[in-house]
Image (cartoon, grey):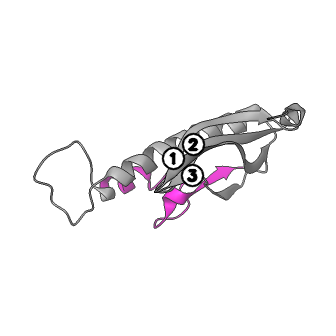
Amino acid sequence: MKYEIRIDYTTGDSFGNEDRDNEDLGLVFDSIDLVEKALVEIEEHYRYAEEYDRAWNDRIHPTVTTGRRFKSEVMKDIVDKPWLSDKDYWQFSIKLETSEGERTQIHLCYIGYFESLRCARAVPVGKNKLEIHF
């Protein structure tokens, strides 16, 4: 059986937001093990991206300790992660392992100033074609 990853996320602008459901990530996996690995990496990437967004810029020296780390500290944690796409704008894409054993870079629709990830799930390919949304 083949699987794909579907994403539910929230997006918007200064005037409001909207939920986007069932967005296809764009990869098809040949095994449940690969798709589970991809979901774990998506969650890990998202947690680090959130922390990086809240982290202190390295040139700032905070006078109050808030539990936040510096951006360079977050980067030290992720430099060897297999999902890391590049060193500059890594938050906006992820490299996931495909059924061929290669890693493919995917742009992430749920990362941005107004975006937040709500759910990532594995879905058998073709199954959603039986659903009707009103």
> 13 and 54: which one is in front?
13
Kindly identify which residue carries mark 3: 83
Residue 132: percent from the left, percent from the top? 85, 33
Indicate the amino acid at tag 1: His
The reply to whether residue 115 is in sight is: no
Mark 1 — residue?
A: 45
- The residue labelled by disc 2 is 41
Image quadrant containing the C terminus: top right
Displayed quadrant of residue 85: bottom right
* Residues at discs 3 and 1 in contact (Cβ within 8 Å): yes
Q: Residues within 10 Å of mark 2 (few under 14, many from 20)?
A: many
**Displayed quadrant of residue 34:** top right
Q: How many angstroms separate mark 3 from mark 1 (CA)? A: 7 Å
Q: Label 3 sits on what residue type? A: Trp
State if disc 3 and disc 2 touch (CB < 8 Å).
yes
Let me know if residue 126 is in the magenta part: no
Q: Secondary structure at mark 1?
A: helix
Assign a secondary structure to mark 2: helix
Q: Quick one: 40 or 60, which is closer to the camera?
A: 60
Percent across and percent down for residue 61 are 15, 60
Q: Amino acid at mark 2?
A: Glu
Task: Determine whether 109 is above or below 126 in the image.
Answer: below
Query: How many angstroms separate mark 2 from mark 3 (CA)?
Result: 7 Å
User: Are circles 1 and 2 on residues that touch, CB within 8 Å?
Assistant: yes
